[in-house]
Amino acid sequence: MNRVSLLSCALLTLFLTGCNQSDTATTKEIYAMDTVMQLTAYGASAQNALDEAESQLLALENAISRTRPTSQVSAINTGTGAVEADDVVVELLRSALDYSHATNGAFECTIAPVVDIWGFTTDDPSVPSAEDLSIAMGFVGSEFVTITDNSICVEPGSAIDLGGIAKGYAAQVVADVFQQQGISNAMVSLGGNVYVCGGRTDGDPWRIGVQDPNNLSGFAGVLSLSDGFAVTSGAYQRYFEEDGVTYHHIIDPQTGYPAQSGLISVTIVSTTDGTLCDALSTALYVMGEADAIDFWRSGVYDFDMILVTDDGRVVVSSGIADQFEADGAYTYEVIS
Ligand code: ADP
Ligand code: MG
């Protein structure tokens, strides 16, 4: 029995009032990267665009899946020597290492040995012994990864996990396909990694529901967005229970344990960069509210955020404050 509970729709694109009756949506649902992906596009080239997006998503999964023995990432993770990787793998890994550096290790793509010791990629996760955890922690660190041109090498025992960044990158891949195919209105949710463009065909922005971590059938709020990416990380997305304690899949690289930062959901919004959104949703979840706000204020990256705290507040950065309606169950705070 699969003991990892998976709830893949932390962000839902909402058809609250729908589009014009005359505009026909073309949709596709794909199961890839361990999640359900829903793609909707409008216009004459929609079917072509969705087909092309699907083939690119499946190719990406083939290259970077950590659970597929034939993937390039699996070959890299055997730790038996350098692997000549495709540009896409090199680009994604370079970005992941950059985000590790920029977030002071809160995002850590070499966390794989620790994720493995918890069994998060298996059907039977469990709490590791302190000794096993400390051994796994010894293999975590970007110093164990070397990239020379397209050749990637990890030290034996170390391994890379692009799971914290992959779906955001995938959303970007879809966005590029849509742009090339001249799609003017679309919305995509790759397991809660949302990309929208052009607003709805009636001219209104898309409405994106941020799931309420305390009531999974409700929303902590709704974001209006015409063009851009929105990605949520939440403890409630993938977790297991042992001896009455819940353990989730976002690891604090400093402790090796699931992050307990006081945040229960982090949504990152960017008009241009889906990969950034995914990396930072994981990183800021680990950082906690105070460091996340400092990070946003530092201006290192251009993004906005919606933080849901475990004491019932929704904290939104000023750039999207007028695009966000919080649910009444939460105290709403805007930071600038
Ligand atoms: P999801 O994949 O559920 O959308 P995230 O984007 O937050 O959620 O990514 C979580 C995944 O990233 C985990 O399943 C694991 O593979 C990996 N991961 C866990 N902790 C970290 C971390 N601190 N830094 C980078 N990746 C992480
Ligand atoms: Mg992420």
Image (cartoon, rainbow, N blue to C red):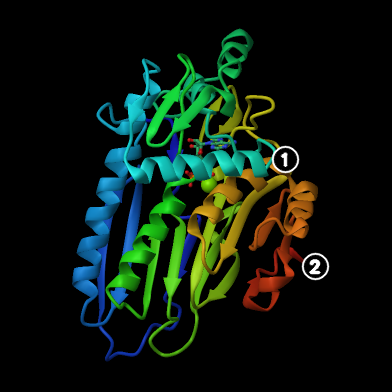
| Residue 254 x, y percent position in the rendering | 69, 27
Please give the name of the residue rendered at 74% of the width and 52% of the height, measured from the top-left corner. 295
**Disc sitting over residue 336 in the figure:** 2
Q: Residues within 10 Å of mark 2 (few under 14, many from 20)?
A: few
- The number of numbered discs placed on residues in the rendered structure image is 2
**Disc sitting over residue 261 in the figure:** 1
Q: Residues within 10 Å of mark 1 (few under 14, many from 20)?
A: some
Query: Residue 84 is drawn in which quadrant?
Result: top left
| Residue 196 x, y percent position in the rendering | 44, 71
Indicate the secondary structure of the residue bearing disc 1. Answer: loop
Front-most of residues 311 and 92: 92
Please give the name of the residue rendered at 31% of the width and 32% of the height, measured from the top-left corner. 72
> Is 124 left or right of 21, judged from the image as shown?
right
Q: Is residue 336 above or below residue 66?
A: below
Q: Is residue 137 above or below residue 180?
A: above
| Residue 297 x, y percent position in the rendering | 77, 59
